[in-house]
Amino acid sequence: MPHVNIKHFPKDFTDEQKQQLAQAITEAVTEHFRTYDGAVSIALEPVAAHDWHETVYRPEIAGRQHLLVKEPNYRND
């Protein structure tokens, strides 16, 4: 505990980029949960853009708003 699962549009990360991301997330999680880095696990889960609404937005964002600490504000930048 804790486990962080990041769902995202497919993106090619190098191993170094994955490690940098994991380190940054681990630092934030260990600080705020007051735990040690060995307790943290992180997963990256690519989701195709055309599947996002049905597999992520509807069940995990719209369907679980009471759990969100930050809501999305989707824009076309």
Image (cartoon, rainbow, N blue to C red):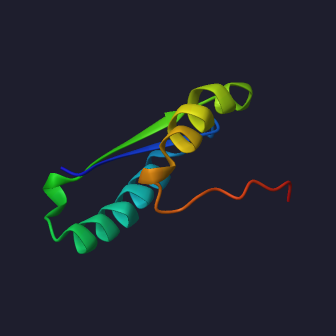
Point out residue 42 in the picture as x, y percentages from the top left corner.
33, 46
Q: Nearer the viewer, residue 45 or 53?
A: 53
Give the side of residue 56 with respect to residue 29, left or right: right
The answer to whether residue 57 is above or below residue 28 is: above
Give the side of residue 46 with respect to residue 3, left or right: right
Give the side of residue 3 with respect to residue 49, left or right: left
Q: Nearer the viewer, residue 25 or 73?
A: 73
Number of residue marks: 0
Give the side of residue 29 with respect to residue 50, left or right: left
Q: Residue furthest right?
A: 76
Point out residue 20 in the picture as x, y percentages from the top left corner.
42, 60
Q: Nearer the viewer, residue 57 or 23?
A: 57
Residue 29 found in image quarter? bottom left
Point out residue 4 in the picture as x, y percentages from the top left corner.
35, 48
The answer to whether residue 26 is above or below residue 51 is: below
Residue at horizontal 85%, vertical 59%?
77
Residue at horizontal 14%, vertical 65%?
35
Residue 36 found in image quarter? bottom left
Residue at horizontal 30%, vertical 69%?
27
Q: Nearer the viewer, residue 34 or 46?
A: 34
Residue at horizontal 68%, vertical 32%?
53
Q: Residue furthest bottom?
A: 31
